[in-house]
Image (spheres, rainbow, N blue to C red):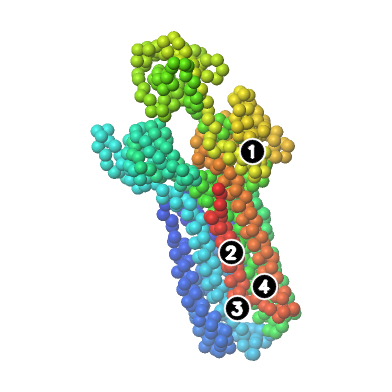
Amino acid sequence: MDPEVVQEGPGLCPKCGMALEPIAPGLEEDTAELDGMSRRFWFCAAAALPVVGLAMALEQVSWVRWLSFVLSVPVVWWGGWPFFERGWRSLQTRHLNMFTLISLGVLVAWSSSAVALLVPGLFPETMRHHGVVPVYFESAVMIVALVLLGQVLELRARSATRVAIRTLLGLAPHTARMVRPDGTEEDVALDQVQPGDALRVRPGEKIPVDGLVTEGASHVDESMVTGEPMPVAKSPGDRVIGGTVNGSGSFLMRAEKVGAETLLARIAGMVAEAQRSRAPIQKLADVVAGAFVPTVLAAAGIAFIAWSLWGPEPRLAHAVVNAVSVLIIACPCALGLATPVSIMVATGRGALAGVLIRHAAALERLEKADTLVVDKTGTLTEGKPELVALRAEPGCSETEVLRLAASLEQGSEHPLASAIVRGARAWGLPLSSPFQFASVVGQGVRGEVDGRLVTVGRGAGSGIQVTVDGRLAATLVVADPIKESAASAIRSIRAAGFRVVMLTGDEESTARAVAVQLGIDEFHAGVLPAEKLGHIERLQAEGHVVVMAGDGINDAPALARADVGIAMGTGTDVAIESAGITLVKGDLQGLVRAIRLSRATMRNIRQNLFLAFVYNAAGVPVAAGVLWPFFGILLSPMLAAAAMSFSSVSVIGNALRLRAVRLE
């Protein structure tokens, strides 16, 4: 669970002793460790049950002691061998961990019993009970069996945390319908698709790779990637995402990103990276765990000495039992799992909701944030101009004027020209080819369409004037529309206790109009990229924890400087790389989900740490025998092993509840 430990091939972490996770996520999961632990557990459980049963019923009978010894040998030395390996490695690397305590406890219990059985004359009378030296084979075998059970349950739970990655990778189809240059079509394996290939997507099929629609139209279900339930309309020029599901239409597309470059593969990689990252709160657990094992060893030594000097007869036997119980119950596995398991589950849950968490620290900081600084263009607005209004002069037809203007603008590369052309196509108007097209810098374009002289250019105010045969025919209004979800998202963010500040490079009037429409009280217009950075630093100097949401290259410095950078998935790669969290859908409703996820995750981590701390704080004194003088209660090593395993399983089970957390 330590991201700093990296090696070639599978192996064990030298710090915690757990199996290392693969860096590159895969569709097929390697279950070799789980299968091996399961085999060991079932064998050890079957061998341990008669040992425990006979020990409880016929403890003093000689043949029972010998049978217990014979059955315990494979349980301890085959079933428990992985623990001895990990315990020895912890001593070699000087990173004492749970396996240090487990292996030491099992070895003390089993070896002292084996010596007592084979050479009882070595033991003084003070260690005998009714003339016989007690043996603890049942404790040794049950410790091994219960720890193996805990390992099996933990491995299964860790597998469950990787379900999100496997689900994402499993969305991609295995084949694609390729359209050859001669018009023929055939199904090919997905790994044969290259950028630039023409592909056909039929009704109900999964889109094979990321690309651009070139012909046809349909609605695509992108909910598995963006978290948005409504299908999205797609027509020529629109981008589609590999792994999403086509509706009832059919279309041709041009492949753009394939293999590891697709959005699905990048999402899976980001989730895997986030699952390996560490939240700052993990440092607390690391500090405690680092000092915990030496403290436990000291506590076990003190318990042994105290019971040897002041315990009831046989004193040394009680001393061994209580020292072993302390070693077993105090294994810090629950403490080590408290944070990373919650992070793994949360990042997977976020990915399925269209919230990509690149670093665990971003989750923790987002929970503490109180100020959202948001860019306007591309974050609150669509980021591309659209035709929003058309005012025709008396005697002129709106549709005919728009058809003429769009036909002329086909020859222009200006963003406003593209908006006019898209508007005409949205109205279903047939466009003609322009003649004698000319672009005049600062004045617009002119040309002949269907025998009529047409000009399109900037007029008074914010309108675009269209003249036909020298007469003003209409005024077009082109603007960057506000995203449909922006208003509700801003309301939800403010309800969550955030102060919202809008920064934009646009002019004052445009910024004010957007701010009023969205209910944003604080905004700054005409802000340059370097000035955005200054605004962030000023807010931080005032003591605020700042979240910055943006999508452009100009937002990258501010995203990197903010306490939490939120990038729109529809934005530039530079912005995405600078941010700690990416919203796949590219709207702020995803930020609302991210805020809820961060708060649920940190609440879950604190619950886990509380469970782990309380368990160890209460368990060690009980195992040491603190209840004996008052209630005559002692905790056997078997019960200590069961309690230790239960603590780990309870922490994992609590973390898995995050898979069902409501983010809407």
Q: Please indicate, yes or no, whether residue 582 appears anywhere in the rendered image.
A: no
Q: CA distance from mark 2 to mark 1?
A: 36 Å
Residue appearing at x 52%, y 88% in the figure? 63
Where is residue 192 shown, x and y percent of the image?
33, 42
Q: Quadrant of residue 125?
A: bottom right
Say which amino acid is labelled 1.
Leu
Give the residue at mark 2.
650
Q: Is residue 66 left or right of residue 624?
A: left
Q: What is the number of the mark on residue 112?
A: 3
Which residue occupies the foreground of this view, 134 or 272? 272
Q: Which mark is residue 623?
A: 4
Circles 4 and 1 in contact, beta carbons < 8 Å: no
Relative height, residue 136 to residue 348 (above, below): below
Q: Position of residue 120 (x, y in %)?
A: 60, 85
Residue under label 1: 372
Q: Callout 4, which amino acid?
A: Ala
Q: In this picture, is 563 found above or below 145?
A: above
> What is the crowding at mark 3: few (fewer than 14 residues within 10 Å), some, or many (at least 20)?
some
N-terminal of the two: label 1 or label 3? Answer: 3
Foreground tag (4 vs 2)? 2
How far apart marks 4 and 2 lie (CA) works out to 20 Å
Q: Nearer the viewer, mark 4 or mark 3?
A: 4
- The amino acid marked with disc number 2 is Ser
